Image (tube, rainbow, N blue to C red):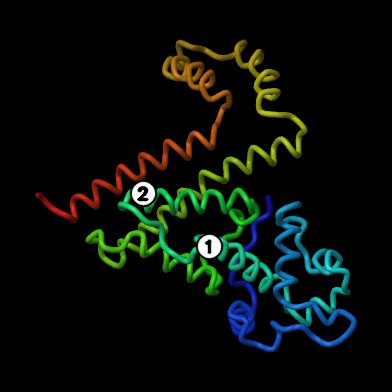
Amino acid sequence: MATEFTGTGDPARSMALLWRTGTESGPRPGPRAGLDVDRVVAAAVRLADAEGLAALSMRRVAAELGVGTMTLYTHVPGKGELVDLMLDGVLGELYPDGEAPAGGWRDRLEAVARANWRLFLRHPWAVHVATGRPPLGPGLMRKYELELRAVDGLGLTEVEMDLLVSLLDGFVRGAVGGVQERSDAERVTGVTEQQWWAATEPHLARVFDAQRYPTAARVGPVAGEQLQAAYAPERTFEFGLARLLDGIGVLVEGRRGPG
């Protein structure tokens, strides 16, 4: 799966487009007078959802919209800015009621993790966008604000609040990446996980030495029988989220002190 980087476009134009403050965001006169930035981004997201980031190009998006590539450039100057707009746009789908998750701290953080998990499953390409230089648009800022509110009031420092939000996001990205790897492997090879294991297992049985690897010999068959896979990302997500929240609980309780 291809990886794209946010923050590679012109900063001034990217910010103007993200916040729709420039003249580029509105419709233009001409045969495609109804075309605007929102339509361009929506078409690019549909393309990436269907075919992945590898299929994304200005030429392909223009074709999806039925316009010439140069027409597209009058709305979005390049692929770098387009990727910023796409990611910020889908991040805006989170928390549609505009409120931070409610409940106790554990319920709130679990809701944050599950909301991000569902987002990345809807838009698999988004997990392959590297965000070390994040697109500082309204979608991302809204996500950051509401997720910070979910960890506010726990006695954490501002830096700890920021790190906790990043920790949850990183955990979800890693776990959901396994779902995409499995899906991509089946699509590319035409072989399911079960078919691959059925073909591989007899060969493994001939070379595997249970005396040399006794722990693997004990654990592997039991895990494989229950999980029905060499790696089960959904189960890993559920197990990992519970353990992550347990660990956060130790931190939270430590901040509250005795009594």
Task: Give the side of residue 53 with respect to residue 162, left or right.
Answer: right
- Which image quadrant is residue 182 in? top right
Query: Viewed as shown, does residue 152 lie left or right of 139?
Result: left
* Residue at numbered disc 1: 96
Nearer-the-camera pick, 29 or 187 = 29
Kindly identify which numbered label has been placed on residue 67. Answer: none
- Residue 86: horizontal and vertical position, in percent? 65, 66
Residue under pointer 2: 107
For image coordinates 85% across by 74% down, the residue present is 69
SS category of the residue bearing label 2: helix
Of residues 112 and 87, the one nearer the viewer is: 112
Mark 1: secondary structure: loop
Classify residue 50 as left or right of residue 176: right
**Which amino acid type is marked by label 1?**
Pro
Residue at horizontal 66%, vertical 13%?
Answer: 202
| Label 2 neighbour load within 10 Å: few <14, some 14-19, many 20+ | some
Residue under the image location 31 percent in, 65 percent down? 159
Q: Amino acid at mark 2?
A: Asp
